[in-house]
Image (tube, rainbow, N blue to C red):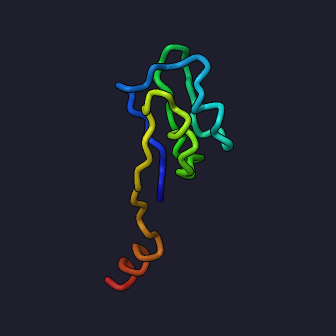
C-alpha cells in the first residue's frame, strides 16, 4: 500500500503549505506553525499529489506493508 512520508529535515514548514492545499482528502496536516507537516496515515492513499506539489521535495511515497489479516487468522487456526 502506498503512503506519503514527510522528510522533516527537508520540510521548510511553508505557510501556507502548498502540498497541504492540493491534498484532496486532507491527509497532510501542519499542527503548529513553523513545524514540519505530518501525514495522517489513516487517510493517505499514496496518490502523490502532495509530493509533486512540494517545492522542497520534502515528501516521498513509499510502499508500506500491511499484514494480511486473513492469512494470519488461517495460520493460527491451522496450528
Is residue 60 placed above or below 18 in the rendered structure? below
Residue ID at (51%, 37%): 39
- Closer to us: 26 or 56: 56
The quadrant in which residue 16 appears is top right
Give the position of the C terminus as an image quadrant: bottom left
Left or right: 16 with respect to 9?
right
- Closer to us: 36 or 55: 55
The quadrant in which residue 73 appears is bottom left
Furthest-left residue in view? 79
Left or right: 63 with respect to 53?
left
**Which x, y percent locates residue 67?**
41, 65
**Which x, y percent locates residue 42?**
56, 47
Residue ID at (65%, 31%): 21
Furthest-top residue in view? 34
**Which x, y percent locates residue 56?**
44, 27
Left or right: 48 with respect to 63?
right
Is residue 68 placed above or below 46 in the rendered structure? below
Furthest-right residue in view? 24
Residue ID at (41%, 56%): 63
Task: Count the labels in the image.
Answer: 0
Left or right: 38 with respect to 8?
right
Residue ID at (50%, 28%): 55
- Closer to us: 60 or 38: 60
Amino acid at each position: 500500500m502506498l503512503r506519503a512520508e514527510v522528510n522533516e529535515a527537508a520540510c521548510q514548514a511553508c505557510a501556507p503549505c502548498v502540498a497541504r492545499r492540493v491534498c484532496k482528502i486532507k491527509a497532510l496536516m501542519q499542527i503548529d506553525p513553523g513545524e514540519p507537516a505530518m501525514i495522517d496515515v489513516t487517510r493517505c492513499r499514496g496518490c502523490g499529489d502532495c509530493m509533486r506539489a512540494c517545492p522542497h521535495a520534502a515528501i516521498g511515497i513509499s510502499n508500506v506493508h500491511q499484514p494480511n489479516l486473513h492469512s494470519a487468522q488461517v495460520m493460527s487456526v491451522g496450528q
